[in-house]
Image (cartoon, rainbow, N blue to C red):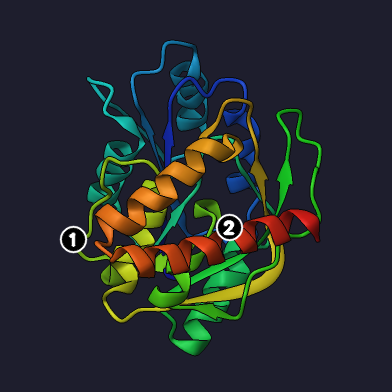
């Protein structure tokens, strides 16, 4: 029997994008999954849209939070409810290609891997592809991840047992901090160099704000990882170079 995959999707005012995201889960060739959607007190009709899916599909669950606590808190709530052998994170505006889960689960089961991620394409708010394939390296460990976060959250699949009691921290770039904390357990991530995810770039998002990203990166190296100045500068320079190179390729 196929192992259960728990998919965690936090959302906040996601009405404009949540429908294709949910459809991309329903269209997966891999069928043994549960989708846990955590609404962080949306003010639009996000919940109404999701409730329509919940009524039609028994493996979609909606959790409505009573207070807005941010994406880190919403993901932690999702982890508390996850029952699967594997945990996947899917942001409410990203889209999975049909073979995403099948290829990752097959790879992980065959090689006994704790965590995988894949290549992806960027899309704009209208769903148009705006980049070449962003490639995934064969593997990445803690030291390599310090210099550049190559793992987009919606591309990941992780053993629930590997995550254990690890929680998301409320901070800028909480996704990067989460992977760093996970990899400190002597865990590495393994890449599938096939674009199986469409990663949406939205106006005003942190990922689209280069100055914020630069500030968060330095803060993580110095404060979260507590690296010395020169070691932080080394990884920061590698991060800056790899980021510029990725845009130019």
Report the front residue among 231 and 182. Answer: 231
Other residues around mark 1 within 10 Å, as few (<14) / some (14–19) / many (≥20): few
Count up the numbered dots. 2
- Residue 143's disc is none
Name the quadrant containing residue 62: top left
Visible in this render: residue 2? Answer: no
- In the rendered view, would you say 47 is above or below 233? above
Of label 2 and label 1, which has the lower sequence position?
1
Farthest-out residue, front: 230
Confirm or deny contact between disc 2 and disc 1 (CB under 8 A). no
| Residue located at (22% from left, 59% from top) | 166
Quadrant for the C terminus, please.
Answer: bottom right
Other residues around mark 2 within 10 Å, as few (<14) / some (14–19) / many (≥20): some
Q: Name the residue under label 1.
A: 165
- In the rendered view, would you say 44 is above or below 121? above
Report the front residue among 126 and 37. Answer: 126
| Residue located at (41% from left, 55% from top) | 176
Farthest-out residue, bottom: 111
| Residue located at (65% from left, 37% from top) | 201
Name the quadrant containing residue 68: top left
- Residue 240's disc is 2
Q: Position of residue 238 (x, y in %)?
A: 55, 67
Report the front residue among 231 and 63. Answer: 231
What is the secondary structure assignment of the residue under circle 1? loop
Q: How far apart are marks 2 and 1 (CA)?
A: 32 Å
Visible in this render: residue 43? Answer: yes
Residue 63 left/right relative to 49: left
Residue 80 left/right relative to 99: left
- Name the mark nearer the viewer: 2 or 1: 2
């Amino acid at each position: 029997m196929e192992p259960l995959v728990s998919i965690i999707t936090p959302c906040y005012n996601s009405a404009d994008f949540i429908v294709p995201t949910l459809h991309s889960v329903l269209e997966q060739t891999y069928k043994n999954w549960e989708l846990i959607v955590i609404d962080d007190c949306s003010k639009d009709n996000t919940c109404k849209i999701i409730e329509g899916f919940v009524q039609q599909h028994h493996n979609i669950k909606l959790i409505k939070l009573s207070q807005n606590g941010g994406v880190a808190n919403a993901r932690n709530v999702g982890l508390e409810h996850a029952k699967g052998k594997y945990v996947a994170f899917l942001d409410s505006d990203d889209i999975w290609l049909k073979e995403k889960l099948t290829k990752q689960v097959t790879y992980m089961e065959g090689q006994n891997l704790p965590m995988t991620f894949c290549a992806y394409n960027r899309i704009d708010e209208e769903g148009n592809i705006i980049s070449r394939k962003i490639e995934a390296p064969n593997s990445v460990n803690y030291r390599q991840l310090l210099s550049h976060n190559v793992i987009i959250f919606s591309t990941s699949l992780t053993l629930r047992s590997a995550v254990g009691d690890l929680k998301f921290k409320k901070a800028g770039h909480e996704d990067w901090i989460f992977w760093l904390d996970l990899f400190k357990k002597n865990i590495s991530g393994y890449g599938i160099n096939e674009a199986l995810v469409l990663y949406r770039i939205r106006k005003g998002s942190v990922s689209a704000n280069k100055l914020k990203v630069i500030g968060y990166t330095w803060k993580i190296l110095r404060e979260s990882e507590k690296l010395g100045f020169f070691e932080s500068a080394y990884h920061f320079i590698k991060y800056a170079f790899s980021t510029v190179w990725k845009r130019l390729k």
